[in-house]
Amino acid sequence: MKEEDKLLEFIIFCVESTAVRLGRCGSEVYRKLKATGALENYVKSYYDTLHTQGETYIVDSLLEYVFYRDAQWLPEGYVPYNQMAEGGERC
């Protein structure tokens, strides 16, 4: 499999995993990730590192990326993982 194909497969995984977490349609999530630059500036740029991480980490990091660019698009009350207190409670 070519590196290009692996990247495309990973992008699809990222989009669909994020869509499942949000309970949204994959095409809607794709459009938002593309519009915010998450696919080009984050997923493609950091593919070598990201593809070695687990699904939870990848989705959390994508949601955080979107949060700082268009927080209103995310579910009401969403707080990035890095802003939660120890034990999963919100700060």
Image (cartoon, grey):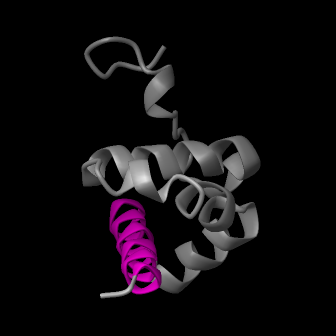
The location of residue 18, given as percent across then percent down, is 41, 63
Residue span colored magenta: 3-24
**Vertical position of residue 28 compared to residue 22: above or below:** below
Q: Which sits in the foreground, 64 or 49?
A: 49
Residue shown at the point (41%, 78%) measured from the top left: 3
Q: From where the camera sits, is residue 33 visible?
A: yes
Residue ranking furthest to the front = 2
* Quadrant of the image occupied by residue 44: bottom right
Location of residue 90 (image quadrant): top left
**In front of the other: 79 or 81:** 81
Q: Which SS type dominates the magenta stretch?
A: helix
Is residue 59 in view from this perspective?
Answer: no
Residue 24: image x %, image y %? 45, 73
Q: Which residue is drawn at 44% across and 75% down?
A: 7
Q: Quadrant of residue 31 in the image? A: bottom right
Q: x, y percentage for residue 82? A: 47, 25
Q: In which quarter of the image is the N terminus?
A: bottom left
- Give the answer, above or below, for where 88 lies relative to 30: above
Residue 11 is one of the magenta-drawn residues: yes
Asked if residue 86 lies left or right of residue 47, the reply is: left
Residue located at (38% from left, 86% from top):
2
Instruction: Please name whichever residue, 49 or 90, is drawn nearer the observer in this view of the structure.
Output: 49
On the image, the x and y values in percent for residue 47 come to 46, 58
Instruction: Say whether residue 30 is left or right of residue 6.
Output: right
Residue 15 belongs to the span the image colors magenta: yes
Q: How many marks?
A: 0
Q: Residue at x 29, y 47 (%)?
A: 53
